[in-house]
Amino acid sequence: MEDCIFCKIIRNEIPSTTIYEDDYVKVFLDISQVTPGHTLLVPKVHVPDIFAYDETLAAQVFSRVPKIAKAIKASDPNIVAMNIANNNGELAYQSVFHSHIHFVPRYSKKDDFW
Ligand code: 5GP
Ligand code: ZN
């Protein structure tokens, strides 16, 4: 998709802090960190939301979730918990219409985010 911000990140046309990449997904820090380490997992193919997934794509994307969660957790001993979220549609607070999964690390100190 020509104008999609995440497609541009996937094509390295705009910079991102990428922490993992393979044939099917790219994983990079969210530009607006809900908590430190807030990360996005995106399929490399442009799909707007979960409703456009087939089973193959679902396996390619969701099979990466535990590996990414563990890697983020391992990056900082102060991470004690994590929200993993996927918004679909404007009413569900989706703002970028290239499907993505949020990883929001939680730290030992209680916070008010999300
Ligand atoms: P949504 O609201 O669609 O679930 O989440 C979209 C996320 O994409 C937001 O958390 C927002 O901060 C992030 N985002 C938007 N534009 C960019 C960008 O250009 N680079 C990165 N790394 N994240 C972005
Ligand atoms: Zn896209």
Image (tube, rainbow, N blue to C red):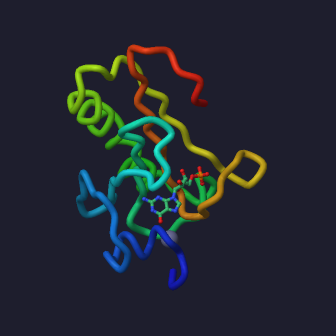
Task: Indicate the quadrant where residue 95 lies.
Answer: bottom right
- Percent position of residue 99, x then y: 53, 57
For image coordinates 28% across by 28% down, the residue present is 73
Q: Is residue 109 left or right of residue 113?
A: left
Residue 86 as seen in the image, left or right of residue 6: right
x, y percent for residue 29: 37, 51
Q: Quadrant of the C terminus?
A: top right
The residue nearer to you, when weighing 97 against 16, is 16
Residue extending furthest toward the bottom: 2
- Residue at 51% over, 85% down: 2
Residue occupying image coordinates x 23% and y 21%: 77
What percent of the width, then of the height, locates residue 5?
50, 72
Q: Nearer the viewer, residue 111 or 73?
A: 111
User: Relative to 41, is 113 above or below?
Assistant: above
Above-or-below relation of 91 to 72: below
State whether residue 114 is above or below residue 32: above
Q: How many marks?
A: 0
Report the front residue among 19 and 64. 19
Q: Position of residue 31 (x, y in %)?
A: 45, 55
Furthest residue in direction right, as rendered: 91
- Which residue lies at the image location 25% right of the left edge and 51% below the top edge? 19
Question: Compared to 104, does 78 lie above or below?
Answer: above
